[in-house]
Image (cartoon, grey):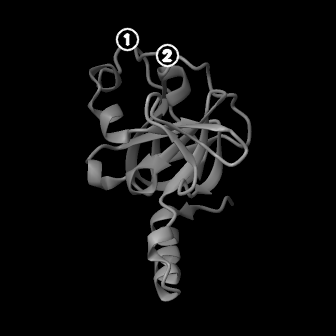
Amino acid sequence: MSKRLNLRDFQQNLSNRLQDKGHAESQVSTLGVQIGAQHWLVDMTDISEVLPLLKVTTLPLCKPWVVGMMNVRGNLYCVADIALFMGLGRVSGEMQNRLLLISSQHDFNAALLVERVYGLRNVQGWRHDTVENCFFDEQGMKWRKLNVPDLLGQVEFLQIGA
C-alpha cells in the first residue's frame, strides 16, 4: 500500500514548528517538481496532496494531454499530463511520477501529473530573474514558477474535448 503525503498537514506542522522557534518569516511554501525536463515551483496552497500515479480510467475523445479520470476517496479528478499540455514532452510513466491534487480552494477537481517531486524549496536567498520570472538556486539551477490559478483559467486547459 502506498503512503500518501498530505501536504496541508505537513505545511501546518512545519509552520507551527517554525513559529515556535520564532522563525515564521522563513516558512517554506513551495514544492519543487519536474515538468518535462524543467524544474518548477508550485505554491503549496494550490495543492492539497501529492500521490503516486493511481489507477486512471481513460476517457474517449479527449485531448492527448488528458490522461483520464481517477477516484480519490470518492472524489473524481481529471488527470492532466501537465508536461504534454505545456509542450514539454510526455510524462515517462515511471515510478517517480506523481500526481498533484489541486486544492479545494480552487473548486476544480484536477490532478496534475508531473515527472517527479523534489520536495520543499525555500526560495529566500535564491536569485530572482524578473525578466524571465524565474529563480536560480545556490547551484545555479533554473526554477520556473507554476501559476496554478492562471493555468486553471486558461480556455485551452478547460476545453478537454478533442
> Can residue 97 be seen by looking at this rendering?
yes
Residue nearest the viewer, comparing 141 with 110:
141
Q: Residue at x 59, y 48 (%)?
A: 32
Q: Is the residue 29 above or below the residue 115 in the image? A: below
Residue that protrudes farthest toward the bottom in the picture: 20
Q: Tell me, yes or no, whether the two marked residues, 1 and 2, touch with CB atoms within 8 Å.
A: yes
Q: Residue at x 52, y 70 (%)?
A: 10
Q: Residue at x 53, y 82 (%)?
A: 17
Category of crowding for the residue at label 2, using alpha-carbon neighbours closer than 10 angstroms: few (below 14), some (14–19), many (at least 20) = some
**Measured Cα–Cα span from mark 1 to mark 2:** 8 Å
Number of numbered discs visible in the structure rendering: 2
Residue that protrudes farthest toward the top in the picture: 162
Residue 131 image-quadrant placement: top left
> Can residue 54 be seen by looking at this rendering?
no
Q: Is the residue 90 above or below the residue 27 in the image? A: above
Image spot of residue 40 (x, y percent): 55, 39
Please, what is the three-letter code of the amino acid marked with disc 1?
Ala
Disc on res. 162: 1
Mark 1 / mark 2, whichever is N-terminal = 2
Q: Quick one: SS at disc 2? A: loop
Disc on res. 62: none
Image spot of residue 69 (x, y percent): 45, 35
Disc on res. 64: 2
Q: Residue at x 48, y 46 (%)?
A: 42
Residue 141 image-quadrant placement: top right
Image spot of residue 154 (x, y percent): 29, 26
Q: Is the residue 17 above or below the residue 143 in the image? A: below
Residue nearest the viewer, comparing 122 with 34:
122
Category of crowding for the residue at label 1, using alpha-carbon neighbours closer than 10 angstroms: few (below 14), some (14–19), many (at least 20) = few
Q: Quick one: SS at disc 1? A: loop
